[in-house]
Each structure stands twice: as C-alpha cells, then as structure tokens.
Image (cartoon, grey):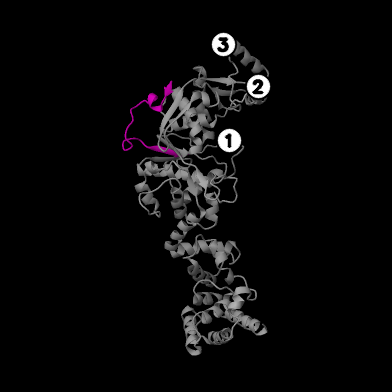
Amino acid sequence: MVCRPTEFKKEADKTLANDSIRVRYAPSPTGHLHIGNARTALFNYLFARHYKGKFIIRIEDTDTKRNVADGEKSQLDNLKWLGMDWDEGPDKPGDVGPYRQSERLEIYKPYIQQLLDEGKAYESYKTEDELEADREAQRARHEMPHYEYEYAGMSDDEIQAKIAESKAQGLKPVIRFRVPEHTTYEWDDMVKGKVSFESDTIGGDFVIVKADGVPTYNFAVVLDDHLMKISHVFRGDDHVANTPKQLMIYEAFGWEAPKFGHMSLIISKDTGKKLSKRDETILQFIEQYRNLGYLPDAMLNFIILLGWSPVGEEEIFSLKDFVKMYDEKRLSKSPATFDQKKLEWINNQYVKSADEDTIVDLALQQLIKAGNLPENPDAKTVEWARKLISVYKQQMSYMAQINEMADVFFNEPDQVTGEALAEISNETAPVVLKEFAKRINELPIFDTVKILATIKAIQKDTGIKGRQLWMPIRIAVTHEMHGPELPESIELVGREKTLEHVNQTLAQLEQA
C-alpha cells in the first residue's frame, strides 16, 4: 500500500497565490538561538512574507528538564535583533493559541483518547529493562533495534488481563501509536523532491505519550500544526526521518498534511562535518555574534545564503530585497557550508556602508567592555574614541576587533625590537626623529592637517623622503611597521605621548 498526503486531503491543491499561507518556527527554550535554528526561522519568515501569509512562533517547552532560564526570551530577542517579526506567538496571541506547548496539554487529551478508542494507539507497559533486553537480542541477531509488539498473539481478553496485571504492579504506561504494516509513506518535498519511507523500517510502534502524560514531539507537532492551520513546514534535513511518523498521525485523524520542505545540513568549511553545538571551535549562536559587535543585517544576509541562492552574482541584499525575490525553488539540496571568513567579509561590507553613529556606538561598547575606556567616558574621551573608530572602520569585520587593531593606543609599547629596530638603524633615522620632535612640540594646533604639513616640511628641509622619512616616525610613535594613516595615528596618540615615545626611541638608538 502506498500512502501519500494528497490521498487524504479534504480539499484539492490550490496555487500558493490562493492558499492561506501559514508557517511557523517552533523553538525549544533549551538554549540560545543557534545559526541553524535562525536559518529555519528565516526561511519560514521569508516564505510567509513573500506570499503575504502569516508567520507564527510556537514554543515547544514540554521537555522541562532541558529548558533553561530565559531560553524563550533569548530566542525571541535574537529573532527580533535579526529583523524578524511575527503575526502570532506567545507575545502576540491569535485565535489558535496558546502558543506554548506546556499550556496546550489539555487540548491534546481528547485526541489521544480518540486514537485509543479507535485502536490506533495503545498503552504499553514494557519497562526500560525489557526494551533494552529486546535490543540486545536484536543486535545479537544482526537486526536493527526496534520495538517488538508486547501483545503479539494475544486475544483481546488476554491483552486486557496483561494491562490489568501491569497496573496492579504500579507500572505507568506510555502510549504507542500502532504503525500500519507494509505501507509506503511518500511526499513531494519542496526541497528534496520525492521522498518515501517504508512503514516497516521506522522501528516499530512509537511512543506518542510519555509515562508522565506529556505527548512526544512527533505527536504534539502534528496536533499543533493542524490546529494552528499550518500550511507549509520548512525545517532542517535532520527532521526527514520524523516525517513518515507524522504522516501516519495525519492519516489516522483523516487530516490534510502540510507541505514539507527539508533544508540541507550546514557543514563546517574546515571539517566538512555537520555543525555540532558541542564544537566550541566555531561560534554557532547568534548571541555570540551580537556580543562581538556583528551587525544584524549582515548576520541575516549571511544566514539566508546558507542553502539558498539568489539569481545572479550579487550577495549583499537587504531583508526587504530578500522578501521580494525569495523563491523556495532556489533552496539547495546540497549541504550549506559555514564559512567564518565569508561571514566576516559580509559583515565588513555592512560596516563600511553603515551609519557612522551606529559603528561608533557598537565599537565604543567593545572598548568599554575590554577595559580600554572607562564605563562612563566623558565627552572628550568619546570624541577621541570617535576619531579612533573612524580610522579603523574600513578594516573592521566586527566591532570587537577594534581592541586588537588599536592596541597601540592603549598599551605603552616596549622598546623597538626585531625588524622594526633594523628598519631605523641607519644614519638618517635620528635626524628625522629629532626634527619631528622639535617641530611637533612647537605646533600651535596638534591635528592631522598640521602633523602632515610638518612631516612634508621635514622632507623639504632635510631632503630625506619616502620610507626613510615615514618609517622612523611610525615606528618611534607606535612601535609598529604598519597601521592606519600616520598623521591620524599620531593625532590619536597625542602630543605628549608622541614626544615621549620619540625621545625613548632616540635614546635607544643612541645607546645601540
């Protein structure tokens, strides 16, 4: 027997333009928003907004042991930070709530009873020890571990007697769904194309209600999606194996299943393996990127390109652009590669074009967090920091880099050493430095324009130019051979510190 979702639809298919499009993102509040979950939310969001449908947030919070404090708040805050809004959710009640599974437990009960009454589900009293013994025996026979029907060969009276005996022993049952035998479940996946599973290969009758009375994911998700009128489900490829179980439940109730689209896995560029939340070598949570001073529009841009491609070669788009041009047919079947360098490049493009005040505000936070600026800097310090940040704006991929890039302005340099010392160990370096120290000490105004004019005047008066002119000054002032424009750097160091550093370097050269 072949069972397709279309065989038990109540209505004929309609075009997307005429459908009532309703999609959802259903996170568990078990931690912060992961890159992969953010992508799931974004693709559902884009689909809804492109077709002028509804985007719903539903919190799947019944696994109380794994829930973390503020897990739901973190999820919602980070979705908002990325630029998404939603039409219904815990904070925006609609007509099909509640929007937390923990508040829907009473809703599930009559549907559970219906399946029990119709013989499509049953109470199972096998203990974990018995189940493990079954699995061990199956492995010994080189079989895939699976649940073996505990009432096999029993009459109805014998089954009832067995159940009564188990209850008398104080055992609490789970409820299992009766899997149809020898049936093919298939669907036309919006990403993968035609997918099919044999019912005999899914591991036997599966649990739909745990011993504590709480429904399992594969059962609750079907009821929630049906009752919330979800029309399309975009989710990760790791959910493919859940789909046939869910189709069985849709079939058992005679309900229309939504259209499914299973998005490709995200793999690490470095390892070629699926991103693992346990891999701490890769930052994988939106919160981490926020803390480093990434821009939300850049993060959103990067995440959308993980498994979806626009027409043409352009890669930088606004959310409004993505909504307009979104096409689910361009979702990739191949794994998406998480490339940290690509993310940094995209963020740098956004930094370069961002409003100056936005960049200054974010970078200022990073400088304060690192202890390079006081927690409540005065107006003079803020103005100095603004100049510093503007010097590095074009180079920064994310705001936290300002601390490393501008380290020379916060930490007193040691003596000049190595390649830098060799660079200025010549006859002309002391000449340049003595002239430079004398002239900047006499400057009425110490700013970039006057500093540049001073260096050019030294060139004119001494005949020393090019590398022999500029490098001694840069190395003496910053102890670095590379950096931003020299006049800007000198202004940021300040007249007093500049003179101090130049005199220290002259003294070092005289002692050599």
What percent of the width, then of the height, locates residue 168? 67, 17
Q: Amino acid at mark 3?
A: Asp
Looking at the image, tell me whether mark 1 or mark 3 is earlier in sequence order. Answer: 1
In front: label 3 or label 2:
3
Seen as rendered, the residue at the extreme bottom is: 461
Tell me the residue at 59%/13% (across/down). 159
Is 89 in the magenta? no
What percent of the width, then of the height, locates residue 266? 50, 45
Q: What is the chief secondary structure element of the magenta stretch? A: loop
Q: CA distance from mark 3 to mark 2?
A: 20 Å
Label 1: state its secondary structure: loop
**Range of residues picked out in magenta:** 1-25
- Pointer 3 residue: 156
Tell me the residue at 59%/44% (across/down). 69
Q: Is residue 93 visible?
A: no
Tell me the residue at 49%/24% (across/down). 199
- The image quadrant where one finds the C terminus is bottom right
- Pointer 2 residue: 171
Q: CA distance from mark 1 to mark 2?
A: 22 Å
- The correct choice, above or below, for 115 with respect to 14 in the image is above
Alpha-carbon neighbours of circle 2 within 10 Å: few (<14), some, or many (≥20)? some
What percent of the width, then of the height, locates residue 360? 49, 64
- The correct choice, above or below, for 234 with respect to 395 in the image is above
Judge by depth and name the residue closer to the eye, 329 or 317.
Answer: 329
Q: Is residue 26 left or right of residue 368?
A: left
Alpha-carbon neighbours of circle 1 within 10 Å: few (<14), some, or many (≥20)? some
Q: Amino acid at mark 2?
A: Leu
Judge by depth and name the residue closer to the eye, 142 or 64.
Answer: 142
In front: label 1 or label 3:
3
Q: Amino acid at mark 1?
A: Asp
- Pointer 1 residue: 63
